[in-house]
Image: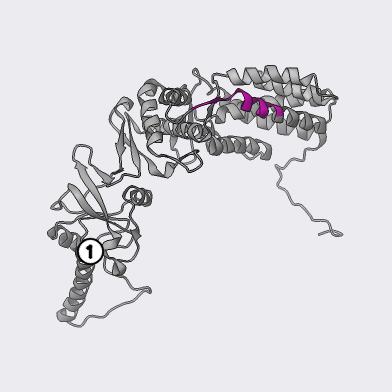
Amino acid sequence: MQQGQPMIIMGDDAQRVKDKDAQEYNISAARGVAESVRSTLGPKGMDKMLVDSMGDVTITNDGVTILQTMDIDNPTAEMIVEVAETQEDEAGDGTTSAVAIAGELLKNAEDLLEQDIHPTAVIKGFNLASEYARDQVDEIATPVDPDDTATLKNVAETSMTGKGAELDKVTLADLVVRAIQGVTVETDDGSHVVDLANLNIETRTGRAAGESRLLSGAVIDKDPVHEDMPTDFEDANVLLLNDPIEVEEADVDTSVNVDSPDQLQKFLDQEEKQLREKVDRIVESGADVVFCQKGIDDLAQHYLAKEGILAIRRTKKSDLAFLKNVLDAPIVTDLDSLSAEDLAIGSVERDTEEELFYVEGEDAHGVTLLLYGTTEHVVDELERGINDAIDVVATTVSDGRTLPGGGAIEVELARRLRDYADSVEGREQLAVEAYADSLAE
């Protein structure tokens, strides 16, 4: 500190930019980021190949994925990434369009600054234009009913256009719409809520995307822990477990000195007794199927198989949470407190060809979209496109309105904004016109 002022120490490569140069530098950096994804926009958009520091390759034209993968150290450019992330969170799609419009706004703002129009006037004009545009969007929007399958399919297909899912967009759009309708509930006030927590996506390679399916219930990509276990149950008592079926370990590091084979046998017998007691608790509860998030000891596997119980270990946390929704069952965290009330009734079926388990509750509360792709890169990009389509259709159902696509709404708003600009006084009028130009370009 010097006379109450902080001392700032910077590296040799640090630069200090201020005044007009800082404006130009920040606008240039942000526009550069926007331009990097602009070529991915639309039906003729090009994919980008991204290679991270670990050498992992991602091939995509999803705007937010590209921007999140880029190594950006300019604070203004990072704000462009935030634009894409916010658009992704709110609407699920349209990230590239949002970033492209932001880039055009910066470009036209820079032109106004070069005409000696103060930044405050530009900001005020942009805010006026933004508020007017939102009002016009509300006026233009067309109501859509959640049961209007044809319109919802068009929304899904529009979202997939220009992405990896486009080749099979008719089939995939139908799956997306049926999936959304399957997890949509009507509230007391007549509005519709889409519970995406009840919609799961499972991906597999080796088949064409057009063979993708929508299944009622959950799909678990796991094998039985023991080959002698049954794999199919029509009305099974299902246990969801987040507690290992293993010998309990000491909380601290310990060492044991054994003086004779009898002492060693006592330790082994004690471990076997612990495992037998854990399995007995499961048997006494009446469970037929156990989905365990933790491990299952080899000896416990043998005991469970002898009791005719199907057990799956290392079930993913996300899969266990989804099974909770599908079966309307609690997740047991302590075997000592297990009772019959903790079990749920459901059907479990094994697909030996796909090596998958299909699980469905009595009143299924969830659906699974099983996506196929020829390779890992293909199915990854397909999943990104499907996720966008799901989010957009879900937003449409919840909001109850649609807008024309293909740039039509931007052109119409630009036309209306130019008419509106005539009523704006001062230099803010130029900013409103610049905002209109940004939407139309």
Q: Residue at x 74, y 17 (%)?
A: 419
Query: Which residue is farthest bottom?
Result: 259
Seen in the picture, residue 98 relative to 7 is either above or below; the reply is: above
Quadrant into which the C terminus falls? top right
Q: Is residue 196 left or right of residue 115?
A: left
- The part of the image, by quadrant, that contains residue 406 is top right
Q: Amino acid at mark 1?
A: Ser
Q: Position of residue 275 (x, y in %)?
A: 22, 68
Q: Position of residue 218 (x, y in %)?
A: 31, 43
* Residues drawn in magenta: 132-144
Q: Residue at x 81, y 33 (%)?
A: 120
Magenta span: predominant SS is helix
Q: Identify residue for label 1.
A: 285
Residue 245 in view in this figure? no
- Front position in the image: 154 or 50: 154
Is residue 321 located in the magenta-colored stretch of the structure?
A: no
Assign a secondary structure to mark 1. Answer: helix
Is residue 136 located in the magenta-colored stretch of the structure?
A: yes
Quadrant into which the N terminus falls? bottom right
